[in-house]
Amino acid sequence: MTSLASAITGRWVQTRGPLFTDMYELAMAQVYVTQGISERAAQFDHFFRSTPDYGTHQAGYCVSAGLEPFMGWLGGLRIDDSHIEALAAMTSPTGTPVFGTEFLDWLAAPDRFEGIEVRAIAEGRVVHPHIPIVTVTGPLAVCQLLETSLLNHFNYPTLIATKAARVVRSARGGRVLEFGMRRGPATGVNEGIRGALIGGCVSTSNVEAAIALGRQPIGTHAHSLVQAYMAIGDGELGAFRAMAQAAPDECILLVDTVDTLASGVPNAITVFDELRADGHEPVGVRLDSGDLAYLAVQTAKLLDAAGYPGVSIVLSSDLDELNIWQILTQIADEAEREGMDPNPIRQRLVYGVGTRLITSHGSGALNGVYKLVGIEDEHGEWTPAIKISEDPGKIPLPGRKAVWRLYDHRDVAIVDLIGLSDEEPLPLDENVVHHPNHSGVNQIIRRADIARVEPLLVTPESGASIDELAARCATDLDHLDPGVRRLVNPHRYHVSITDELHKLRADLVTRAK
Amino acid sequence: MTSLASAITGRWVQTRGPLFTDMYELAMAQVYVTQGISERAAQFDHFFRSTPDYGTHQAGYCVSAGLEPFMGWLGGLRIDDSHIEALAAMTSPTGTPVFGTEFLDWLAAPDRFEGIEVRAIAEGRVVHPHIPIVTVTGPLAVCQLLETSLLNHFNYPTLIATKAARVVRSARGGRVLEFGMRRGPATGVNEGIRGALIGGCVSTSNVEAAIALGRQPIGTHAHSLVQAYMAIGDGELGAFRAMAQAAPDECILLVDTVDTLASGVPNAITVFDELRADGHEPVGVRLDSGDLAYLAVQTAKLLDAAGYPGVSIVLSSDLDELNIWQILTQIADEAEREGMDPNPIRQRLVYGVGTRLITSHGSGALNGVYKLVGIEDEHGEWTPAIKISEDPGKIPLPGRKAVWRLYDHRDVAIVDLIGLSDEEPLPLDENVVHHPNHSGVNQIIRRADIARVEPLLVTPESGASIDELAARCATDLDHLDPGVRRLVNPHRYHVSITDELHKLRADLVTRAK
């Protein structure tokens, strides 16, 4: 697929090149270069501050996405003459160059982006607020340059992987398809779709993205097919027959263009009978408007009566995790009223989830940040860095750190513990740990309660397939307490910091003030 | 800039190639090809159903964006062997090929995407619900294939151009900078930024996008610069001095890392004095946290007293149109309390607007659609197409249409009138026109009240600069009634359909039922 993935068409080419970053990163790098501190070793941490709040519902966890594309971007970073020329042409209000030759020569060095050490939580893992998801260590100026692009690579895909995991869990085993490219954020839908597949969607409607990600794209047909046949005189039945003839082994018919129960489903059954007589099995019908729960039950009833209990019912139309939950709840009620078993109905449902997934409806951005946590001083000594903010909740955790996920004897993940990288996670029988940003809130973790300690920050490995990433996500979700997975008002997962880290931060804040 | 715009790095290459479309478009095209109707002339219209509703506030108009990138994509469409191979490899559940050779041969024809006629409302224009923004005429199967990509090209950029226009208007002359790439939708931020500039942002922080769009990117510095100097012992003042030395003619200092009024602004003034003594003029300070209105007034007071009345005050931190409105309102109150004139304070403000602009906070997707409105029948006769939806508001307007913008004697745009393309817009002294989707709602337009009739659908012209598009947008906004521009609960702009079009649709609905 390399040739496809690198085929570029159109004049407005979208890339993430080496200058896909904020101007101020370059301005700061120039300061560090001209002041002679650009090569000081520094560490920056990427983390997010809180899980998405969708208004009426809230995420109890996030699913990390973006690591492999980021590492690919980082590995391919090359500054060429065109970049240097573009920067050299920028001028201040008085006409002087923004970037001097000292900085541009530094930037143009062929090995400029080598020697950066990245440690990260593996892509697809469940992650929580405050824990470092990526740590970047290297020369101060280079680490600074990476900030904006790193955040761009992680924030949106993680947001969508998180939403997808919620939608997929709400479907309780029903398959979820990603259908969002028409209203999603332009070329950004590609990264959103990758996140959606990591979060558990089985495929996408986007042909190009599916091919690039090694999935087969999924689609049915649009109302326009039926409209076209109505306009030329063959009507809905003619449209369905044409569709079945063109794709007899994967026939899914959209039944709501005229009237779902009076026209669409009966016409579909007629065509399914013709298909079966011809030796083919129909695949499904799609409902795209109206009362989806009611129509799904009535459609199932008609299909069952006609001898098609195995045909899928694809639902679409502004779906999200709450709508799917509501549909499944209503189906149970509708089925009871009809004297039907709701379980086979649920099992044949497939969900096409578009706009609300690809835009993370209700919470359109993740608040991931990238903060300096340590720097080498003039004597080569490592010095933790601190920022005193007007908001005490925004003081980042200083120094080089480790993150351990603690599992209890049920193998449920109960705490993510952040400590200094040279610490033992649980040195005592009873360990005092602290809330990451509310001072005075602490708890005790008894070593005897912990069955397993898993270090989360590792050296990134490339080459995992989307299936592997999705499997990691599913495994981590299974290890969460059901209360944390709850769609509305979830239990807050515990993220704590060790006593050592807590003391270091307190000391630094006191010194800075 | 060609070499930069075409420089591709990273393994996950983002493109909009010929397969950047939904699977079902290909499935339908195959139906049309195998059924022998692929070459029938057809017309599809792109329009949106409603302006964004952000929850507590609502848009009274949209700003169209995406046309030039779409035309560039369309003009560059080429199907190559890799695309055909990828499609040929797709199989149905029973293992049969999804796409047959008849369709793939059709698709691979070198002139496949020629002969498509596009008419559109010029990019940057103010647009309203229901009016056709793009009409696509050509062979049925080809027009169908374009659907998803066309919508992807228009929906998100139009959403962001609209939000940007609102933010820019709320700033009442203060300059607005686009700062959203770190939390925006991955590579989609590029198209979002283009929309933001069309809507009136003066520039962006994104270096690559700014270069591609012919603007100089804008940036200040981050908290990390101050943190780094604090960690190595030189403190905030050391950081400011370093910044000033590296960029003496464009020095903007971020003053909230330690304490805005007690440390940041006084240190900035110290450095500004040093700059001035050296023959340079400082440019600004930036406030990124706390009570921005209060801090802006206090900062202005300190800067004025120190002899820097011309220095800009850049505000950032979760800004949007409501926050800016609130800040300006509060500044008037704060200034009064201090005995200061608020006007010079307002005039020196610059707004860095990030997440809430690039994600269109409160309304993350525009509901643009692409609907079949007419098709040639077997006798070569043009036949309007109709869709009977369960929701009467969703019945599209059939047939080939024109859109006229009617201006009154104040040169205010008062109605967008949709009619059939062979109609005169106002044939009578008094013309009955109808609501586009609520039957029975009509009004009379007197020809004597209309000073100017402007046809909106034209053949797209390429090559307009972003400045020209932004100027179009500003001009159109100036021609709106202030009530339509209102941030909250705006007047509804009148969109009407002619009596002829109204009758055609009613006839078609009756016939279809």
Image (cartoon, coloured by chain):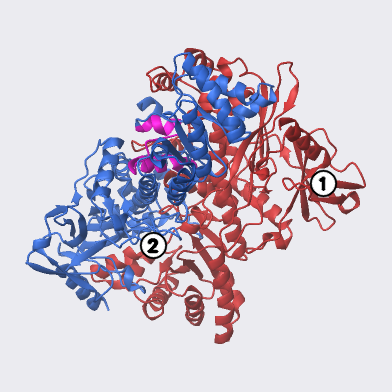
Chain colours: A blue, B red
Q: Which chain carries label 1?
A: B
- Quadrant of res B491: bottom right
Q: Nearer the viewer, residue B174 or B216?
A: B174
Using the image, determine if residue B302 lies above or below residue A204.
below
Let me know if residue A113 appears in the view. Answer: no
**Residue range of the region highlighted in magenta in the rendering:** A186-213
The residue under the point 19% across, 75% down is A507
Same chain assignment for discs 2 and 1 = yes
Q: Main secondary structure of the magenta part?
A: helix
Compared across the picture, whether A406 is left or right of B109 comes to: left
Q: Which mark is residue A253?
A: none
Which residue is denoted by mark 2 in the rendering? B221
Q: Where is residue B217 in the image (x, y as percent from the top left)?
A: 47, 53
Q: Which amino acid does label 2 sit on?
A: His
Which residue is denoted by mark 1 in the rendering? B433
B303 inside magenta stretch: no
Q: Which residue lies furthest to the right in this view?
A: B429
Which image quadrant: the C terminus of chain B? Answer: top right
Mark 1, Cα crowd under 10 Å, few <14 / some 14-19 / many 20+, is many
Q: Position of residue A217 (x, y in %)?
A: 42, 30
Q: Which chain carries label 2?
A: B
